[in-house]
Image (cartoon, rainbow, N blue to C red):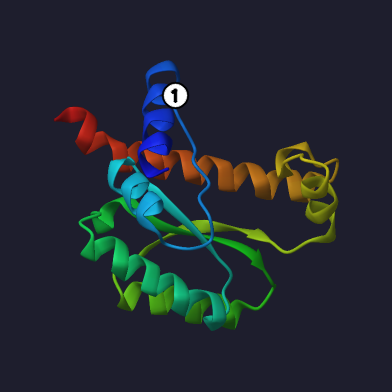
Amino acid sequence: AAVDKMKQVKASARRYDDVVVDTAGRLDNVSLSLAAAADAVLLPSSYSPDDILPTLKVIRSLREAGVAGSKIAIVFCRTGGSRAQEVQARSVLAMNDVAALDVSMPQKDGYVALFATGRTGRESPNPYLRRAALAVEEALADFVDEAAAPQKAA
């Protein structure tokens, strides 16, 4: 199955500028192979230690498998309004030399309704939610471009 997935991704990569692969919520051989081949690896997490600590284990496994730390970043999502939790989460990541996007996707009821119907945050009628989603999109694209630059130059 892993070989089939990699063939599918490589075929898509020849036809498109960008390919996003959302893997299962566990680290397996397919996920490791995809991460190794990727320009960037983006991992979602909330500010909660219940999310941060398992995510750090995944990052450790990725690094041990040879995935460059410079290709890995945390995307904070489902975040609350606690500045203290944000500071703590970001400091834990910094202590572990893990990048995190500067913006986050807050936990808001308006997103739940959008996601349940297959839409994205940029499609929100609420200007605040739309701006937050677009800021995350832009930060994601910037990180991917920066992570891919050394590989494209080679």
Position of 25 relative to 19 (above/below): below
Q: In the rendered view, does 152 fall on the left or right side of 78?
A: left
Q: Where residue 29 appears, x then y in whole percent? A: 35, 55
Q: Where residue 65 appears, x then y in whole percent? A: 23, 59
Position of 149 relative to 76 (above/below): above
Residue at the extreme left: 154
Indicate the quadrant containing the C terminus: top left, top right, bottom left or bottom right. top left
Residue at the extreme front: 1
Q: Where residue 57 appears, x then y in whole percent? A: 37, 74
- Badge 1 density bin: few <14, some 14–19, many ≥20, Cα 10 Å: some
Position of 80 relative to 152 (above/below): below
Q: Where residue 129 appears, x then y in whole percent? A: 76, 50
Number of numbered discs: 1
Q: In the rendered view, does 125 fall on the left or right side of 2?
A: right
* Residue of label 1: 12
115 and 88: which one is in front?
115
Which residue is found at the position 58% from the left and 70% from the top? 46
Q: In the rendered view, does 152 fall on the left or right side of 27?
A: left
68 and 95: which one is in front?
68
Which residue is found at the position 18% from the left and 29% from the top? 153
Indicate the quadrant containing the N terminus: top left, top right, bottom left or bottom right. top left
Which residue is found at the position 66% from the left and 46% from the top? 133
Which residue is found at the position 73% from the left and 64% from the top? 107
28 and 71: which one is in front?
28
16 and 146: which one is in front?
16
Q: Of the residues shown, which amino acid type is indicated by label 1?
A: Ser
Instruction: Assign a secondary structure to mark 1.
Output: helix
